[in-house]
Image (tube, grey):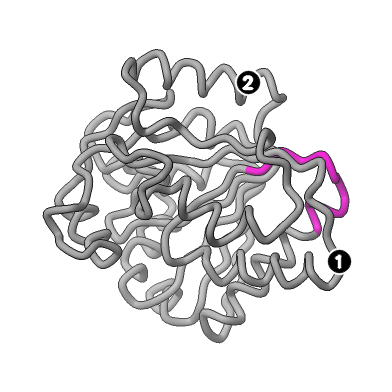
């Protein structure tokens, strides 16, 4: 695992964007695994700027998002479909048919999960997976547990995750209690992984993630067994790393 410790959130975001840009330039037909939340926003903004400066071309790029809130439609402002469109997709030249996000309104959730895994497999798998980390160590919405799911699945979100995500909603009661999340097998099959973390609230999770032990109650710790992981953090998130 390579670790880049940047001065602040802005520097961390720029570093992450440069790493993603390198992948896009080297392989213009890359399959990207994308994350949502507050942490990747700066990276997406940098990538949009690079696109408008003529440095990047997303016309042949394909993407798969890690997760989606269950019960929210694409039209909902708080859906991850809406997040990706507003913060990234509509600002670049990616083709709509080349973007995939789990269907949060799927009537048959099991079928939706199986189909999503199959579509990733048929595409050839993820070339570069972007990850954030929850303050409880989750990646995607793979929550701490005695046993972890390897396939895309429906997740009952932990109270900690619901509380952390409530900042994006008008009321805590509005935060969905479930989500569809890509499982750890698909994440670990990615050829390359970039993990982003910013702020003191992520310091404990980052410390546990790189501790040298794999713990199902810190799902991100499994990344220590992957052959090509880059951790990009700001100083606050890295403050507890030895």
Residue 158: x, y in percent?
Answer: 19, 46
Q: Which residues, given as a range, are shown in magenta? A: 22-32
Q: Residue furthest bottom?
A: 7
**CA separation, marks 2 and 1?**
30 Å
Q: Nearer the viewer, mark 2 or mark 1?
A: 1
- The residue where tag 2 is placed is 121
Does residue 238 lie above or below 174 as drawn?
A: below
Residue 190 within the segment the image draws in magenta: no
Left or right of 5 in this view: 150? left
Residue 29 within the segment the image draws in magenta: yes
- The residue where tag 1 is placed is 55
Q: Residue at x 38, y 48 (%)?
A: 79
Does residue 181 lie above or below 241 as drawn?
A: above
Residue 8: x, y in percent?
Answer: 52, 84
Left or right of 153 in this view: 71? left
The answer to which of 220 and 76 lies nearer the viewer is 76
Marks 2 and 1, the one that precedes in the sequence: 1
Does residue 61 lie above or below 2 as drawn?
A: above
Q: Which mark is residue 22?
A: none
């Amino acid at each position: 695992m390579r670790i880049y410790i940047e001065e602040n959130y802005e520097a961390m975001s720029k570093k992450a964007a440069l790493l993603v840009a390198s992948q896009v330039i080297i392989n213009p037909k890359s399959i990207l695994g994308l994350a949502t939340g507050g942490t990747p926003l700066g990276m997406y903004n940098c990538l949009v700027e690079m696109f408008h400066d003529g440095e990047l071309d997303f016309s042949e790029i394909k993407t798969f998002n890690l997760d989606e809130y269950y019960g929210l439609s694409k039209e909902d402002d708080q859906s991850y479909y809406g997040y990706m469109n507003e913060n990234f997709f509509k600002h670049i030249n990616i083709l709509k048919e080349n973007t995939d996000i789990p269907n949060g309104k799927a009537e048959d959730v099991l079928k939706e999960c199986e189909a999503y895994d199959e579509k990733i497999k048929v595409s050839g798998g993820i070339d570069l997976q972007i990850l954030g980390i929850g303050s409880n160590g989750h990646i995607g919405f793979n929550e701490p547990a005695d046993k972890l799911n390897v396939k895309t699945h429906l997740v009952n979100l932990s109270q900690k995750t619901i509380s952390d995500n409530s900042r994006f909603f008008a009321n805590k009661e509005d935060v969905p209690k479930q989500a569809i999340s890509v499982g750890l097998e698909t994440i670990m099959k990615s050829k390359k992984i970039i993990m982003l973390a910013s702020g003191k609230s992520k310091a404990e999770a980052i410390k546990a993630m790189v501790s040298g032990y794999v713990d199902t109650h810190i799902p991100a710790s499994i990344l220590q067994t992957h052959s090509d992981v880059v951790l990009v953090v700001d100083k606050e998130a890295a403050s507890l790393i030895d």
